[in-house]
Image (spheres, helix red, strand yellow):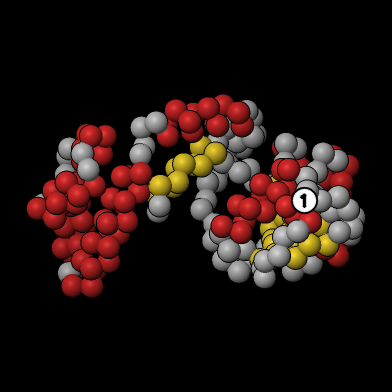
Amino acid sequence: MENLYPILLSLQNKEVLVVGGGCVATRKVKTLMLHNANVTIVSPDLTEYLENINITNVKVMKRRFRPEDIKSKFIVFSATNDSKLNKEIKILCNKNNILLNAVDDPENCDFYIPSIIRRKSLVIAISTEGKYPFFAKLLRKKLEETINSTYGEIVDYLGEIRSNIKKCTPEYERKKILRNKIYEEIFNDLKTESKETIKARIDNC
């Protein structure tokens, strides 16, 4: 397999199709809702959660998949255990230049979902490129022990500083100033110090 291109993708108001109505599909839908996608769910069988969902940007169609379901979709998730259906959807998506993720079916995937650590705006994605997803989950749990919530707080704080610096600093000076805001001991401090202490040390740089 060729090396895959990692990317962080905005799904804000994008049209997304989820084929399937079981537990896996439910988890996908919940995640997509967090990212403000417009989600269409197609499945003859639904979990209780999907059966009773009542959210403006989520549409449920309790029936089997039809080829026209992919029309105007940005991406498609196939969360079924039907490899024949996955292959059919893959052919349709390829013809229409739509990306497909078929859960636990690497041969019919255009992209894989990494295991994610999220601390506010700090996002760390871990992937085995579909070869052994469980290893990525174990590694994520290991890293979560180290990368605490303070990391995200500090990234957001640095983002505010960067925005202000961009407004009032000439471009030729900007890079040096931004680099100096990250002091050498910051990663040691992230393990032991409070966010208030780290912010004060950033301000003093």
Left or right: 28 as drawn, with respect to 163: right
Q: Residue 190 placed where, x, y %?
A: 25, 39
In the figure, is residue 175 to the left or right of 2? left
Residue 12, quarter of the rendered image: bottom right
Residue 205 percent coordinates (x, y): 11, 52
What is the quadrant of the N terminus in the image?
top right
Assess disc 1: are there few (<14), some (14-19) or many (≥20) residues with their C-alpha within 10 Å of its C-alpha: few
- Above-or-below relation of 111 to 189: below
Q: The disc labelled 1 sits on which kind of residue?
A: Glu
Q: Nearer the viewer, residue 142 or 172?
A: 142
Q: Which residue lies at the image location 63% right of the left edge and 66% below the top edge?
A: 14
Q: Residue at (81%, 51%) from the top-left corner?
A: 46
Q: What residue is pinned by disc 1?
A: 48
Q: Secondary structure at mark 1?
A: helix
Determine if residue 79 is in view. Answer: no
Q: Is residue 149 visible?
A: yes
Q: Quadrant of residue 173?
A: bottom left
Q: Position of residue 170 (x, y in %)?
A: 17, 70
Q: Nearer the viewer, residue 204 or 131?
A: 204
Q: Position of residue 7 (x, y in %)?
A: 52, 51
The single residue placed furthest to the left in the displayed view is 204
Residue at 51 percent of width and 53 percent of height: 8
Is 132 located above or below residue 71 in the figure?
A: above
Q: Is residue 111 left or right of residue 95?
A: left
The residue lying at 42 percent from left, 34 percent from top is 144
Front-lying residue, 40 or 175: 40
Report the label total: 1
